[in-house]
């Protein structure tokens, strides 16, 4: 059986807290280009702490939610120990794999409403 | 699909630098005044290096989060069919893949309303989304699947040191770490399972005693107890060991004696006197009678059983509920060996098996065969409601299969 340890690296009980923005549907560009490095939008907060996200031609009003069950952000990691059992190569390789909890996500900003269009014409300058 | 959104039209080059002026222009188009929002805007970008495939989200139960934060051992255990469970040191969780049509954008840094100044000069903070995910793992607490533990232990039962080298004892013997490698259960659950299966550690390997061998050990202990008049006062362990240790390993004698004795809260490790548990001892003698005999005439059995138990002990059919079945409908009435262990572990499989064995069960009869399936949310009554059909027969409530007989 494959056994993989899940741990907070250098766990001293504390773990970084990361964030999540949840959007309805998919983020797409008009043309299929890689998303890397692209602007998604501007996130504002009103004075009463309502998150407002402006994406392209759309405006979304959201909500900050405390997650009832937080998420752990896991990445696979490889331990560089000497394999314990040289004769079980397969086994030894598995043993080196670990999942690291890089951070915990305790709240998310949820934008669940259908986005409202805001601009008829995109100014050339933008 | 509803809710699909465009990012900024890709035909227009998005400058990696976004100015306050850009932000304000967009705000204006959105018909918002800069005074409507806090002066600090967070501009959200996709990272240059999106890590969509390397990041997994795991939804955490409070107990799992506590275990992780305490630095306790938390392990994923996959089996050959690629079904994985997650184990803390005392709990097992099924891992289920949950998919969302929503997009979850993950960020390493983000400020929320109350973190941001209410007034002051306009400010921009650049935030990066390093991953977009659409699925996460859910955890659901489950009962550990310990059946495989029994199978492993049965590969090489212990029948005494003189038999260790013979042909019947060439099967594999296992250590705790072997179990941890094979059984999809947490360490504490495995330890509890070993206890329930009456396993003991002999020379570093976990073993169960072959029943015939165990009966020999038990008979020797009981004979000695009768001889020394210990039945009512308790077995003196050290004296018992002195007499029997030439025949059996000390740990085997202690194991058997402890199992058939009353476990009181003040029984500590060094305690020297063990008082027999009457019910367990009677159960043992019933098993000796029934184990290899198929169906037994009930009245004959009751007589043989009563004669076999140590003097002063009383037998009762309630002692062997969950071990044997009485058939009141046959003539003469019979009893047969039907142990509750080794039944199918999944709930509906268990009920199918039970109703195949016998069509109608009373509550008392069926309870010992399903009690291990109960959860804090579902007791025996609730299980029966869900998986069986109740009817009344001769004024007694009986349970039968929900399946229609074809």
Image (tube, coloured by chain):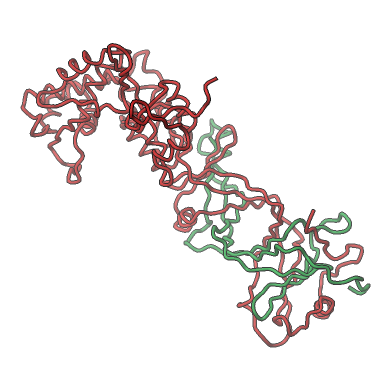
Chain colours: A green, B red
Q: Which residue sits at x=67%, y=74%?
A: A50
Q: Position of residue B182 (x, y in %)?
A: 48, 33
Q: Is residue B95 above or below residue A46?
A: above
Q: Position of residue B201 (x, y in %)?
A: 31, 32
Q: Which residue sits at x=25%, y=18%?
A: B288
Q: Position of residue B37 (x, y in %)?
A: 71, 80
Closer-to-camera residue (B58/B378) = B378
- Residue B232's quadrant in the figure? top left
Q: Residue furthest front?
A: B395
Q: Is residue B375 above or below residue B250?
A: below
Q: Is residue A64 above or below residue B313?
A: below
Q: Which residue sits at x=43%, y=27%?
A: B400
Q: Is residue A12 above or below residue B277?
A: below
- Residue A55's quadrant in the figure? bottom right
Q: Residue furthest right?
A: A124
What quarter of the picture does the C terminus of chain B occupy? Answer: top right
- Residue B34's quadrant in the figure? bottom right
Closer-to-camera residue (B251/B148) = B148
Q: Position of residue A25 (x, y in %)?
A: 75, 56
Visible in this render: residue B250? no
Q: Is residue A104 left or right of residue B261?
A: right
């Amino acid at each position: 059986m494959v056994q993989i340890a899940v741990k907070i690296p250098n766990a001293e009980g504390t773990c970084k807290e990361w964030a999540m923005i949840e959007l309805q549907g998919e983020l797409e560009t008009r043309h299929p280009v890689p998303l890397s490095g692209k602007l998604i939008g501007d996130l504002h907060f009103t004075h009463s702490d309502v998150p407002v996200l402006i994406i392209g031609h759309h405006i979304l009003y959201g909500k900050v939610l405390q997650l009832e069950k937080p998420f752990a952000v896991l990445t696979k990691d490889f331990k560089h120990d000497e394999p314990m059992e040289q004769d079980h190569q397969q086994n030894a390789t598995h043993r080196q794999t670990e999942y690291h909890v890089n951070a915990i996500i305790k709240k998310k900003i949820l934008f669940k409403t259908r986005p409202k269009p805001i601009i008829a014409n995109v100014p050339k300058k933008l | 699909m509803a809710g699909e959104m465009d990012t900024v039209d890709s035909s227009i080059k998005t400058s990696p630098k976004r100015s306050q002026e850009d932000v304000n222009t967009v705000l204006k188009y959105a018909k918002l005044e800069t005074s409507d929002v806090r002066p600090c805007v967070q501009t959200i970008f996709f990272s240059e290096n999106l890590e969509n495939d390397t990041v997994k989200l795991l939804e955490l139960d409070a107990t799992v989060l506590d275990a992780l934060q305490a630095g306790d051992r938390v392990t994923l255990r996959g089996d050959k069919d690629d079904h994985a469970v997650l184990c803390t040191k005392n709990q097992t969780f099924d891992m289920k893949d949950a998919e969302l049509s929503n997009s979850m954008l993950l960020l390493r840094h983000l400020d929320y309303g109350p973190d941001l100044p209410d007034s002051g000069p306009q400010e921009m903070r650049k935030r990066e989304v390093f991953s977009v995910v659409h699925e996460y793992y859910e955890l659901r607490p489950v009962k550990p699947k310990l059946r495989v533990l029994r199978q492993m232990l049965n590969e090489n039962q212990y029948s005494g040191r003189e038999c260790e080298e013979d042909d019947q004892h060439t099967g594999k013997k296992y250590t705790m770490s072997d179990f941890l490698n094979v059984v999809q259960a947490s360490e504490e659950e495995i330890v509890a399972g070993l206890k329930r299966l009456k396993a003991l550690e002999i020379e570093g390997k976990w073993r169960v005693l072959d029943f015939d061998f165990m009966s020999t050990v038990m008979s020797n202990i009981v004979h000695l107890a009768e001889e020394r008049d210990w039945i009512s006062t308790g077995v003196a362990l050290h004296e018992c060991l002195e007499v029997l240790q030439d025949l059996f390993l000390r740990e085997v004698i202690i194991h058997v004696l402890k199992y058939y004795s009353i476990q009181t809260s003040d029984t500590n490790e060094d305690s020297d006197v063990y008082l027999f548990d009457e019910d367990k001892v009677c159960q043992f003698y019933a098993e000796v009678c029934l184990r290899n005999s198929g169906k037994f005439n009930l009245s004959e059995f009751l007589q043989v059983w009563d004669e076999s138990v140590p003097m002063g002990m009383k037998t009762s059919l309630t002692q062997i509920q969950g071990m044997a079945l009485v058939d009141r409908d046959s003539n003469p009435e019979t009893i047969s060996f039907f142990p509750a262990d080794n039944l199918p572990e999944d709930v509906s499989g268990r009920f199918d098996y039970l109703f195949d064995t016998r069509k109608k069960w009373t509550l008392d009869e069926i309870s010992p065969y399903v009690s291990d399936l109960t959860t804090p949310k579902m007791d025996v009554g609730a299980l029966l409601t869900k998986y069986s059909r109740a009817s009344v027969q001769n004024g007694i409530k009986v349970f039968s299969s929900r399946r229609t007989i074809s």
